[in-house]
Image (cartoon, helix red, strand yellow):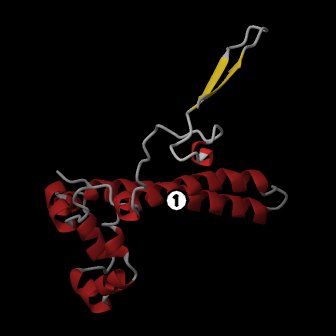
């Protein structure tokens, strides 16, 4: 047994035809309801969280290898950064005495350099800071010298911080690239 329904539109619309399949053997018409339309599309499996978080094949970043490949220490030496740091009292022995490397490890600074989300977070921070400077200058009135000083300090801090965040984002991104 087969049920057919036709709808024709005389107002220039598209005609519609519906045909319900015959009931299954045994007379149970509920299993082949004319209102049930089965999708012919295949369902795709939902990707697991581990597949979406790790987009790189090799997620481990060899930080010291990349520092060596990019010759960062040579560039720092040629720029005079090491001698300037030593003149200001920051030498390798001072870093060792103060325990700065272990503190950086405790705060997660070294592991953040290998995290794939760090460059994006630093870029967002830089954008936020660079938007904050003009925003504060616009919102804070210029009625007193104190308010003008506040505008200058916030704008300067936002420009310096935003620029540093952009530079750090670029540095961490280049350290994480694999060759």
The x and y percentages for residue 158 are: 58, 59
Farthest residue, direction front:
26
Q: Which residue is mark 1?
A: 125
Q: What's the residue at 30%, 72% (across, down)? A: 85
Q: Quadrant of residue 106?
A: bottom left
Left or right: where 134 falls relative to 111: right
Query: Could you tell me which secondary element the residue under label 1 belongs to?
Result: helix
- Number of callouts in the render? 1
Q: What's the residue at 32%, 55% (across, down)? A: 55
Question: Which one is in front, 35 or 120?
Answer: 35
The x and y percentages for residue 83 are: 24, 69
Question: Which one is in front, 96 or 65?
Answer: 65
Left or right: where 4 falls relative to 11: left
Question: Which one is in front, 8 or 109?
Answer: 8
Left or right: where 47 falls relative to 30: left
Farthest residue, direction bottom:
97
Q: What's the residue at 16%, 57% (across, down)? A: 71
The answer to whether residue 115 is above or below residue 41 is below
The x and y percentages for residue 49 are: 40, 63
Quarter occupied by the N terminus = top right
The answer to whether residue 170 is above or below residue 89 is above
Q: What's the residue at 28%, 55% (across, down)? A: 56
The answer to whether residue 33 is above or below residue 143 is above
The x and y percentages for residue 28 are: 59, 48
Sort mark 1 into few (<14), some (14-19) or many (20+) by Cα contacts within 10 Å. some
């Amino acid at each position: 047994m087969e049920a057919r329904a036709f709808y024709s539109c005389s107002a220039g619309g598209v005609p519609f035809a519906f045909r319900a399949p015959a009931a299954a053997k045994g007379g149970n018409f509920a299993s082949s309801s004319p209102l049930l339309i089965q999708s012919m599309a295949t369902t795709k499996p939902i990707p697991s969280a581990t597949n979406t978080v790790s987009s790189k094949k090799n997620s481990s970043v060899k930080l010291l290898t990349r520092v060596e490949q990019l010759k960062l220490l040579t560039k720092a030496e040629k720029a005079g950064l090491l001698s300037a740091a030593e003149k200001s009292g920051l030498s390798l022995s001072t870093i060792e005495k103060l325990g700065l490397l272990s503190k950086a490890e405790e705060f997660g600074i070294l592991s953040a350099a290998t995290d794939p989300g760090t460059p994006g977070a630093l870029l967002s921070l830089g954008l936020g800071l660079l938007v904050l400077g003009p925003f504060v200058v616009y919102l804070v009135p210029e009625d007193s010298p104190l308010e003008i000083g506040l505008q200058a300090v916030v704008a300067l801090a936002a420009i310096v911080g935003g620029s540093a965040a952009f530079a750090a984002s670029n540095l961490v991104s280049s350290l994480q690239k694999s060759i």
